[in-house]
Each structure stands twice: as C-alpha cells, then as structure tokens.
Amino acid sequence: MNKTTNKAMKTILTLSVIVVMLFTLTGCRWWVEIQARNDVIRAEANAQMIIIEAEARLQAEIAHAEAEVVRAQGVADAMYIVNDAITPMYLHHFWIRTMADHGNTIYIATEAGLPVFNVVDD
C-alpha cells in the first residue's frame, strides 16, 4: 500500500469512528428523551389512578352515608310506631298475652289492673 491509500484508509476510519460516535451520542439523547417521555406518561397514569381510587372511595362513603340515613329513618319510623301508634290498651293486652304464654304465670284482673302471680318454687 502506498501512502495515499494508507492516509485515505485512516481518514475513512476516523470518519467512521466520528459517525459512530455522533450516532451513539444522538442515539443516547434520543433514548434519554424517550425515557423521560415514558416517565412523564407513567407519572400521569399514576396520578389518574390515584384520582380514580379517590373517587371510588368517595362514592363508597356517600353510599355508606346514604345507607346510614335509611337505617336512621327506619329507627325513627319504628320509634314513631311504638310511641304514637300503639295505644296503652294494646300494650296492656300484649302484656297479658305474653304473661299467659308462660306456664308459671296466672293473670287475674284486679281493681288496679295488676296481675297476681302464682309463685312456684322449683
């Protein structure tokens, strides 16, 4: 090989190394940019997931609160029935029937309307 060919080969080799280095540097920057974009996309997806989970917890709490209101309304309705709709006469009748259902109790109407108990020693 002559000097000109040798010099041309060195120049081509040097240019090839420069091209490879530029491609590598450009490729690295490109890769870093892709990774940065992926990180942003991942962070946005995580933020959306947190928002969705928070909204689901909020909906569950709202449903729980509504259920508590319904339960409280049922208790209030039951209290109304007991306090306002059931008369003292009915309660007296219910008391007599309950006592009659127990074998050791005998009800005898007295002037005061109180029962007389038959005490049985076991």
Image (tube, rainbow, N blue to C red):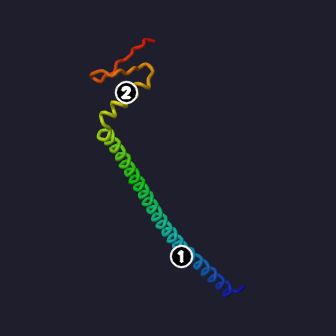
Q: Position of residue 36 (x, y in %)?
A: 48, 68
Image height of 27 relative to 90, above or below: below
Q: The C terminus is located in which quarter?
A: top left
Image height of 102 relative to 94, above or below: above
Question: Which label sits in the foreground, 2 or 1?
Answer: 2
Please name the amino acid that badge 2 sits on.
Ile
Please name the amino acid that badge 1 sits on.
Thr
The circle drawn on residue 56 is: none
User: Residue at 45% of width from left, 21% of height from top?
Assistant: 103
Q: Position of residue 32 (x, y in %)?
A: 51, 69
State left or right for residue 78 relative to residue 27. Answer: left
- Within 10 Å of disc 2 (Cα), the crowding (few <14, some 14-19, many 20+) is some
Q: Which residue is mark 2?
A: 96
Q: Which residue is mark 1?
A: 26
User: Residue at 39% of width from left, 14% of height from top?
Assistant: 119
Q: CA distance from mark 2 to mark 1?
A: 98 Å
Residue with the most extreme right position: 1
Q: Which SS class for mark 1?
A: helix
- Within 10 Å of disc 1 (Cα), the crowding (few <14, some 14-19, many 20+) is few
Q: Nearer the viewer, residue 66 or 30?
A: 66
Q: Which SS class for mark 2?
A: helix
Residue with the most extreme left position: 112
State left or right for residue 93 relative to residue 56. Answer: left
